[in-house]
Image (spheres, rainbow, N blue to C red):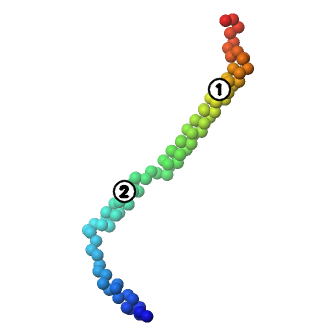
Amino acid sequence: MKTESSFLKPLDTIQEVETPPFLLTRIHQRIEAIKANQISPKLAWGLAVSFSFLLIMNMVILNGNRKEKHENNLVESLHISTNNDLYK
């Protein structure tokens, strides 16, 4: 059975690695650049609300057109005159 010191022997061969100069500042710059590219929560909520409003308005308009079409089809199927001209 290996003892704990013989088990950890390979760790003695590990050497310290030299890091490139200004590595930490480059990492911080990348983090700041990512933060700068994000949109604010107020803008995100505003866009979501306006998109939802437009979607609802589109559905209302489309349903209004469908109802008018349905009424026109019903009038045409019953052969009812759609104009008020008495004399042609």
Q: Is 3 placed above or below 41 here?
A: below
The reply, left or right, for residue 60 in relation to residue 22 is right
* Rendered image quadrant of residue 25: bottom left
Q: Residues within 10 Å of mark 2 (few under 14, many from 20)?
A: few
* Rendered image quadrant of residue 72: top right
- x and y, in percent, of residue 59 in the image: 60, 36
The N terminus lies in quadrant:
bottom left
Q: Residue at x 54, y 41 (%)?
A: 50
Mark 1 — residue? 69
Q: Along the line of sight, which residue is nearer the eye, 82 or 60?
A: 82
Q: Along the line of sight, which residue is nearer the eye, 84 or 32?
A: 84
Q: Is 55 placed above or below 7 here?
A: above
Q: Residue furthest top?
A: 87
**Kind of residue at disc 1:** Lys
Q: Residue at x 60, y 32 (%)?
A: 61
Mark 2 — residue? 33
Q: Is 21 placed above or below 87 here?
A: below
The label on residue 8 is none
**Kind of residue at disc 2:** Ala
- x and y, in percent, of residue 42 in the image: 50, 49
* Rendered image quadrant of residue 7: bottom left
